[in-house]
Amino acid sequence: MRPGSGRRCAAADVNSYVAEGEAITEGATLTFVPGTAPTPSTYVLTDLDGDKVTSTRADGGNGHLDGGLFRITKVEAIRGKAGSTVLSPAITSVTYTAAGNPRLLLAPTDAGAACTDPTTTAQPAGCRALEFRYTGTGAGERLAGVTLWAHGAAVPTGGLVDGGTLVAAQQITLAQYGYDTAGRLTSVTDPRSSQQVTYTYRTDGDWRPSPRSAARRPGRSATTTASCRASPRPRWTTEPTAWPLSARAFATTCPWTAATPPCRT
């Protein structure tokens, strides 16, 4: 988020804000908190229900910065009441790498407890986290994989779930990404099912599907068509019904049918 990407409703209504291109306000308020060192400045967007989204100054500085970058770091969701007691909000938080890419997305427990870095600290039962792993540094940082961390409750001898007993964290790799020496994406793999899509590039740098992309599942294989020069960006599509399952294709945006050969390479 960068300041200045919207407009105020009226000079007298200092807390009303309308996004660019919108005609009316939704009743949300945007509050600037200048911060005092070492606490960076923030913008807090609050909707009519009281839910809040906090964006923090990316360089860690204080005060307002024209054109400065503010990243979303916290989302607070109102949880209502338990009897006459107002429950604390459920907090989802986001942390970033030094290069500014998301590193951890931390979801709260059902009870609203905040969760922290599962790679360094034991978490309460019910915590969930997405960890984004990278290869390279700085501008050369590339996403290498995504891992789900899940903490639950143990089942004791009696067979009943004990919500106070923490199970060792489950680490489930959801996706892995490969790159060539130029930093271009070459493969996307789901290690849970061994499905994989691979990518190659023409000498002019445009993307094209591999001749035999391996979207593999047990007992099945997949191939890809050649790419259109005029439309290098592909999309998933459904193959003609006459094709066998073993010939599922990753087709390009160029029009063709089973009776017409695909576009030239």
Image: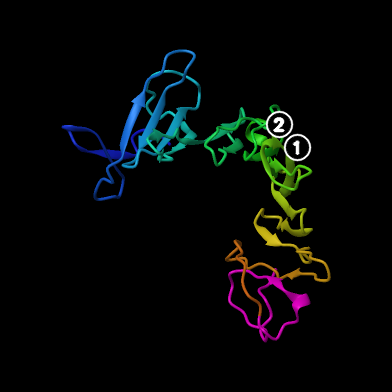
Q: Quick check: is 241 in the magenta stretch? A: yes
Viewer-nearest of discs 1 and 2: 1
- Type of residue at label 2? Thr
Q: Which residues are magenta?
A: 240-265
Instruction: Give the camera-side residue of 16 and 162.
Output: 162
Q: Quadrant of residue 262?
A: bottom right
Disc 1 crowd rating (10 Å Cα; few below 14, some 14-19, many 20+) is some
Q: Is residue 22 above or below residue 242?
A: above
* Screen quadrant of the N terminus: top left
Q: Main secondary structure of the magenta part?
A: loop
Mark yes or no: residue 144 visible: no
Q: Quick check: is 9 in the magenta stretch? A: no
* Screen quadrant of the C terminus: bottom right
Measuring 69% from the left and 45% from the top, which residue is drawn there?
161
Give the percent coordinates (x, y) of residue 81.
Answer: 40, 39
Give the percent coordinates (x, y) of residue 248.
Answer: 72, 74
- Type of residue at label 1? Ala
Which residue is the site of mark 1?
A: 168
Instruction: Give the camera-side residue of 126 and 189.
Output: 126
Q: Is residue 24 above or below residue 193?
A: above
Mark yes or no: residue 127 visible: yes
Mark number displayed over residue 119: 2
Judged from this view, the residue extending furthest toward the top is: 37
Name the element at disc 1.
loop
